[in-house]
Image (tube, rainbow, N blue to C red):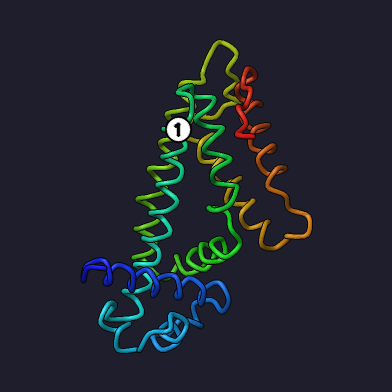
Amino acid sequence: MTRVEKKQFTRRKIIQATMDAIASEGFSGVTMAKVAERARLSRGIGNFHFKSKEQLLVEVLHSIYFEFDGAWKRAIVEADGSPTAQISAMIETVLRPPIAEKKKLAVWLAYWGEIHSRETYLKICNVHDREWVKAVENILQELVDDDFKSRDMRLSGIAESLTAMMDGFWVNSLIYSDRHTEENAIKACFAFLKSFFPAFRPIRSN
């Protein structure tokens, strides 16, 4: 590997080790020493790449959003072009692994728990989440026809509510893993959309 590739590889190892620590121990389990140990690196190397624990945690948040954003944007591009296929693919992508893997969801929830006291995290989440909600709203706009039932809600509100449902299913999958299923979560989101768009017929990936 080139020097640049080695640097990127090491940074990825450190970020992954940090995610492992957050998922298993929460934010209290994240120290530069513990992360270096998990990554099987010297603490000095860890400090070379990330000057502080806070810088590392910010980078991890950017990393999980990078994966999340890339996944749902690819889902839109790879759908057949219809808004029905696009929104169906977005829902399935967000509620299935690899995005909805238990470890990653535990990391998301850890950050959400810190948002009220960490303005930096809140700002990062707001930027990415607004882009997601706006993308959902734009697709829903294309689904509007003569049978559309607004139920006194704006499309932005429907998009935000759909997002809240999916966030809730993420939480359920961690707390109630014995009875949570991806399939039921996906069907519930489809049923929610159908209550506003009677002609909606989801296009399944399998």
* Residue 152, above or below 106: above
Q: Give residue 40's quadrant in the image.
A: bottom left
Question: Which residue lies at the image location 54% right of the left edge and 43% below the top edge?
Answer: 93
Q: Quadrant of residue 130?
A: top left
Residue closest to the far left: 3
Task: Between residue 79 and residue 168, name the one nearer to us.
Answer: 79
Residue lying furthest right: 179
Q: Residue at x 41, y 35 (%)?
A: 135
User: Could you tell me the amino acid type at mark 1?
Assistant: Glu
* Number of dots carrying numbers: 1
The answer to whether 110 is drawn above or below residue 71 in the figure is: below
Lateral position of residue 116 relative to residue 46, left or right: right
Q: In this view, does 206 lie above or below 102?
A: above
Q: Residue 141: percent from the left, percent from the top?
A: 46, 23
What x and y, as percent, mark residue 156? 47, 34
**177 on left or right of 91:** right
Residue furthest to the front: 1
30 vs 90: above or below: below
**Residue indicated by mark 1:** 78
Image quarter (top left, top right, bottom left or bottom right) of the N terminus: bottom left
Residue 100 pos. (x, y %): 57, 54
Element assignment for label 1: helix
Asked which quadrant contains residue 163, the reply is: top right
The residue nearer to you, when weighing 6 against 73, is 6
